[in-house]
Image (cartoon, grey):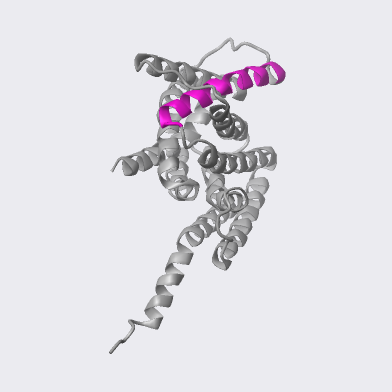
Amino acid sequence: MKVTAAYIGVILIWSTTPLAIKFSTDSLSFIVAVGLRMSSAALLCLAIMAVLGRFPRWDRASLKAYGASNLGVFGAMSLSYLAVGFIPSGLLSVMFGMAPLLSGVFARWLLDDERLSWVRNLALLVALGGLFLVFRGAVSWRPDALPGLLASLGAVALFALSGVLVKRQAGHLDALEHTTGSLVLSVPLFVFSWLVLDGQLPTEFSTKSVSSVAYLSVFGSVFGFMLYFYALQALGPTQVALIPLITPVLALALGHVLADEVIAPATIAGGVLILVALALYQLGDGLRARMRSQTRGPSVTG
């Protein structure tokens, strides 16, 4: 029951995150918006741990786990914030539909998982076709969308790799400690990035930016990451990565209704192909095995 609730919570939070990311950059640069989000979330997590009389561990094994997480917390999030300046927020969620497939590939290399079946290899090919349509449609609709597409693809790759590495490194940490340590470690990375990429203190804070940063700090980072890490440790990276099969539909609807976002038909077709590939990747082997057993029929003895 707890795992199911965490799973649903992640779906709801991730569905609203792309649009909240876009809104948070209304009056802030992308690196300031994401840096404020993660810094605020880190302070909140430290406060929660202090109330509980705890503090994150900084031993070698824990640092490895926090470092693995920051491929997603720092790397994937920074690229995601950069991407929404060029592409619709809902399209970012569609791009994250590639995460389960990349997770499977990374898990095969890093966790010694079983070799991918021909069904899953077919799903990868279908997803690549969908990705091609997404790129073609978005660039033809908005020629300046290419940097956002490349940034979102990089974000997806880092997110998937982070999930696999976390599964290998973070078994000794609970969700709160893992979230807190990862966020604290991300703060100097964001500060350094701000100094290099921006270096200017914001002079205006719109209500949209402030409320979005606050929402993302509390729900997107603290509760979202805790629920994500909890579900990841309980279910594994591939099952958790199934979430992007659901969230794109909700994210696209929110972007259209609340931000008047429009997506090219070819991009929508590519997104559908990616979701079909996800379904094939996650369910194809099971359906194939079930059909095979039904074809053979019950064994007769006697």
Identified at 57% across, 43% down, the residue is: 160
* Drawn side of residue 205 relative to residue 254, left or right: right
Furthest-bottom residue in view? 302
Identified at 49% across, 37% down, the residue is: 260
Identified at 40% across, 81% down, the residue is: 295
The x and y percentages for residue 123 are: 56, 61
- The verdict on residue 149 being magenta is no
- The verdict on residue 177 being magenta is yes
Q: Taking 110 as reference, is 56 above or below it?
A: above
The image quadrant that residue 225 belongs to is top left
Q: Could you say which is closer to the camera, residue 64 or residue 227? A: 64
The x and y percentages for residue 232 are: 45, 41
The x and y percentages for residue 116 are: 58, 61
Q: Taking 156 as reference, is 68 above or below it?
A: above
Q: Taking 133 as reference, is 288 above or below it?
A: below
Q: Determine if residue 257 is in view.
A: no
Identified at 41% across, 75% down, the residue is: 291
* Drawn side of residue 44 relative to residue 188, left or right: left
Q: Could you say which is closer to the camera, residue 177 or residue 155? A: 177
The image quadrant that residue 66 belongs to is top right
The x and y percentages for residue 201 are: 62, 11
Dominant secondary structure (helix, strand or loop) of the stretch shown in magenta:
helix
Q: Quadrant of the C terminus?
A: bottom left
Q: Quadrant of the N terminus?
A: top left
Q: Determine if residue 284 is in view.
A: yes
Count the marks. 0
- Give the residues in magenta: 173-196
